[in-house]
């Protein structure tokens, strides 16, 4: 619990510092995404489909502070006579670094860290059970932006404490809605 509070406080301090230092235009966007769980997570969860709201604020010419929040619903999966379904509610903050200097087309790398609230439900022989948990999660990846479109691919780690068992591939297609 103390680690979660420390991570939240650190995130808020970085967000406040970035707000004070930002000179560029802040943007809002929306990302549609697909998540493909792998490893042990992939044994229990199907493909995830969802959407994330995106906020971006430039800190330096090639460095941008990012925040995303959304919902991912995984298709149900049958395994050994049990039907399982799961969902995530990610709340992530991070940075994006643009490798190219062109404003019309950018290749970038990014990393995000935050809280991911997960829920799973299992049905076995007419008996149902469910559980939810909030973990520290992260994404690592890169993408390509052109005009108002943003195509991104990430490694998704919904629980940093279980890196070897809980990992997935995530692809999003985003659209820049407005500039603030």
Image (cartoon, rainbow, N blue to C red):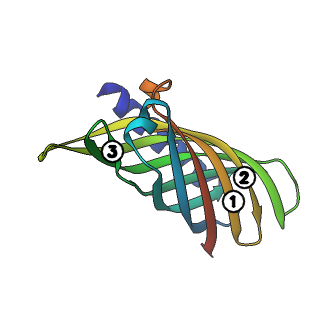
Is residue 124 in view? yes
The residue wearing badge 2 is: 143
Farthest bottom residue in view: 178
Q: Secondary structure at mark 1?
A: strand
Label 2 to label 1: alpha-carbon separation: 5 Å
Q: Residue at x 39, y 44 (%)?
A: 45
Judge whether residue 61 can be spotted in this image.
Answer: no
Q: Residue at x 54, y 56 (%)?
A: 34
Secondary structure, mark 2, is strand
- Figure quadrant of residue 146: bottom right
**Residue 13's x, y, as percent?**
49, 41
**Residue depth check, mark 2 versus mark 3: number of the one nearer the observer:** 3
Left or right: residue 85 versus residue 170 is left
* Mark 3 Cα shell of 10 Å, populated few (<14), some (14-19), many (≥20): some
Label 1 packing within 10 angstroms: few (<14), some (14-19), many (20+): some
Q: Image point 69% across, 59% down: which residue?
A: 151
Kindly identify which numbered label has been placed on residue 78: 3
Q: Is residue 136 above or below residue 31?
A: above
Q: Is residue 109 above or below residue 148?
A: above
Question: What x and y, as percent, mark residue 33?
Answer: 54, 59
Q: Which mark is residue 151?
A: 1
Image height check: is 77 above or below 101? Answer: above
Give the quadrant of the N terminus: top left
Left or right: residue 120 versus residue 100 is left
Query: How far separated are the C-alphas under marks 2 and 3?
Result: 33 Å
């Amino acid at each position: 619990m103390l680690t979660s509070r420390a991570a939240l406080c650190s995130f808020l301090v970085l967000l406040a510092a970035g707000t004070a230092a930002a000179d560029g235009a802040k943007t809002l966007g929306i990302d549609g995404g697909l998540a493909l769980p792998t490893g042990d997570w992939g044994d229990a969860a199907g493909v995830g489909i969802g959407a994330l709201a995106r906020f971006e604020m430039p800190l330096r010419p090639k460095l941008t502070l990012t925040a995303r929040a959304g919902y991912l619903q995984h298709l149900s999966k049958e395994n050994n006579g049990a039907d399982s379904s799961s969902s995530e509610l990610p709340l992530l903050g991070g940075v994006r670094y643009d490798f190219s200097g062109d404003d019309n087309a950018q290749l970038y790398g990014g990393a995000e860290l935050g809280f991911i609230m997960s829920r799973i439900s299992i049905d076995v022989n007419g008996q149902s059970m469910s559980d939810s948990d909030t973990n520290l999660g992260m994404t690592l990846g890169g993408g390509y932006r052109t005009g108002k479109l943003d195509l991104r691919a990430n490694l998704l780690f919904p629980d940093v404490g279980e890196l070897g068992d809980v990992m997935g591939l995530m692809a999003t297609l985003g659209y820049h809605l407005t500039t603030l």
